[in-house]
Image: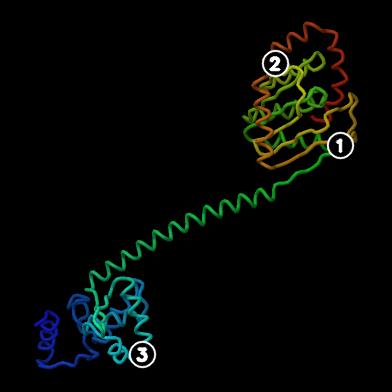
C-alpha cells in the first residue's frame, strides 16, 4: 500500500469512516499543502482554490497550477484522462504539461501511453525558485547590456548635438572668449600666436583674475616680447601660470574644462582694434575637438620655458618698448 493511499484512507476515516472514495472527488485535498489546523472549518474546495492561488505566486498561471494540484491529488495521469477530468482539450493539456515539465514541477514517463507525474511539492517549488533565479540572472545581464547600449546611444546622441560656430568679427570673438573664461569651472588654458595681439594686449586679464579667484586653474603660453612683456607680468600677478614659447607659429586657442573651445584660424589683428574687424575663429562644445586642442596645448606647454625669466630679459633689453604698450590700454575695455 502506497503512502498516498494510506493518507487518503486515514483522512477518509476521520471524516466519516467511508471505505471507498471517488478518485475524482472535488472536496478532497491532501494535507501536504498546509498544516491541518491552517484551514480548519474552511470547505475543501476553498482550500483547493487557496493552494492554487499560492502556487500562482511561483509563476504558474491558474490553469497550470490547477493541473499540477490535480496530479498531486490523484497521481500520474495520461493526457486523455486529464482532459476529461479538467473538462478541456488534449492540446490544452499538452501545453500545460509541457510548461510544468519545463519549470521542473512534473515529469513524463517513457512508456507508449505516457503519463504525467507530479514532482513532490517541496522539490517542485524549489525547482521553480531555481528557474526564477536563472531568469533573474539572465534579466540582470540583459539589463546591463541595455544600460550600456543606452549610455552609448546617449553619448552618440550628445555628440550629434555638439555644435560648431564660426566667429567672423572681433566683437563676437571678444564676447565669446570672455564667456568661455567666465564659464570655466575647473580649468582654462590658452596659447596665443604672436600676431593674435588681442590676448597679448591684456583684454582678458580681469576675466582670468576672476577665474583664478574661484579656484579655476589658468595656464597660458605666449611668445613674450618687449611689446607684451608688461601684460604677461600682469597675467602672472593675477595667478595665471604662464610660459614663454619662442617663435610660436601654431594655432591660437582657448579651452575651458576640456569641453568647450575656441580656435582662431586667422590670427592677425591690427593694433587699433575695431569691433567690426574681420576675423575667422571656430567655437565648439565638441569634446573631441577640445581634446585635440588640449593635446596641442600640452605639447606646447612642455616645450615652453619660464615666463618670469623671459619677462625680465625683455624688460631689461628694451625699456623703450614699454611705450609701445600704451595704445594697448585703449583695448582693455573691449575684453574687460
The answer to whether residue 132 is above or below residue 296 is below
Relative side of 193 to 73, left or right: right
Q: Is residue 47 visible?
A: no
**Most foreground residue, 196 or 295:** 295
**Most foreground residue, 306 or 119:** 119
**Residue 295 screen position, x and y as percent:** 65, 31
Q: In the rendered picture of this protein, how many numbered marks are placed on residues?
A: 3
Residue name at image x 70 percent, y 47 percent: 162
Relative side of 327 to 156, left or right: right
User: Could you tell me how far apart the alpha carbons at marks 1 and 2 are, in whole angstroms?
Assistant: 30 Å
Q: Residues within 10 Å of mark 3 (few under 14, many from 20)?
A: few
The answer to whether residue 249 is above or below residue 15 is above
Q: Residues within 10 Å of mark 1 (few under 14, many from 20)?
A: some
User: Could you tell me how far apart the alpha carbons at marks 2 and 3 are, in whole angstroms?
Assistant: 93 Å
**Residue 225 screen position, x and y as percent:** 79, 15
Question: Is the C-beta separation of discs 3 and 1 under 8 Å?
Answer: no
State the SS at label 3: loop
> Which residue position is annotated with label 2?
307
> Which residue position is annotated with label 3?
88
State the SS at label 2: helix
Q: Quadrant of residue 294?
A: top right
User: Could you tell me how far apart the alpha carbons at marks 3 and 1 are, in whole angstroms?
Assistant: 84 Å
Residue name at image x 25 percent, y 85 percent: 77
Between label 2 and label 3, give the one nearer the viewer: 3
> Which residue position is annotated with label 1?
169
Amino acid at each position: 500500500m502506497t503512502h498516498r493511499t494510506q493518507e487518503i484512507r486515514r483522512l477518509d476515516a476521520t471524516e466519516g469512516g467511508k471505505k471507498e472514495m471517488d478518485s475524482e472527488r472535488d472536496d478532497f485535498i491532501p494535507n501536504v499543502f498546509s498544516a491541518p489546523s491552517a484551514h480548519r472549518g474552511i470547505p475543501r474546495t476553498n482550500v483547493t482554490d487557496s493552494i492554487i492561488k499560492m502556487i500562482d505566486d511561483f509563476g504558474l498561471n491558474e490553469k497550470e497550477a490547477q493541473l499540477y494540484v490535480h496530479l498531486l491529488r490523484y497521481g500520474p495521469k495520461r493526457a486523455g484522462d486529464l482532459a476529461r477530468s479538467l473538462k478541456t482539450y488534449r492540446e490544452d493539456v499538452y501545453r500545460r504539461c509541457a510548461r510544468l515539465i519545463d519549470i521542473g514541477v512534473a515529469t513524463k514517463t517513457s512508456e507508449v501511453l505516457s503519463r504525467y507525474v507530479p514532482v513532490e511539492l517541496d522539490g517542485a517549488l524549489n525547482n521553480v525558485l531555481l528557474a526564477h533565479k536563472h531568469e533573474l540572472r539572465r534579466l540582470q545581464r540583459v539589463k546591463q547590456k541595455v544600460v550600456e547600449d543606452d549610455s552609448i546611444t546617449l553619448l552618440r546622441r550628445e555628440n550629434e548635438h555638439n555644435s560648431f560656430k564660426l566667429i567672423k568679427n572681433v566683437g563676437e570673438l571678444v564676447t565669446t572668449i570672455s564667456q568661455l573664461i567666465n564659464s570655466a569651472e575647473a580649468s582654462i588654458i590658452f596659447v596665443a600666436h604672436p600676431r593674435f595681439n588681442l590676448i597679448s594686449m591684456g583684454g582678458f586679464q580681469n576675466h582670468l583674475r576672476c577665474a583664478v579667484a574661484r579656484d579655476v586653474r589658468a595656464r597660458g603660453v605666449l611668445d613674450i616680447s618687449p611689446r607684451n612683456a608688461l601684460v604677461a607680468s600682469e597675467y602672472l600677478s593675477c595667478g595665471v601660470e604662464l610660459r614663454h614659447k619662442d617663435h610660436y607659429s601654431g594655432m591660437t586657442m582657448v579651452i575651458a574644462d576640456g569641453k568647450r573651445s575656441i580656435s582662431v584660424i586667422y590670427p592677425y589683428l591690427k593694433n587699433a582694434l575695431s569691433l567690426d574687424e574681420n576675423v575667422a575663429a571656430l567655437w565648439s562644445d565638441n569634446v573631441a575637438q577640445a581634446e585635440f586642442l588640449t593635446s596641442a596645448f600640452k605639447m606646447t606647454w612642455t616645450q615652453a620655458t619660464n615666463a618670469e625669466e623671459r619677462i625680465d630679459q625683455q624688460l631689461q633689453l628694451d625699456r623703450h618698448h614699454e611705450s609701445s604698450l600704451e595704445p594697448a590700454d585703449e583695448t582693455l575695455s573691449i575684453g574687460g
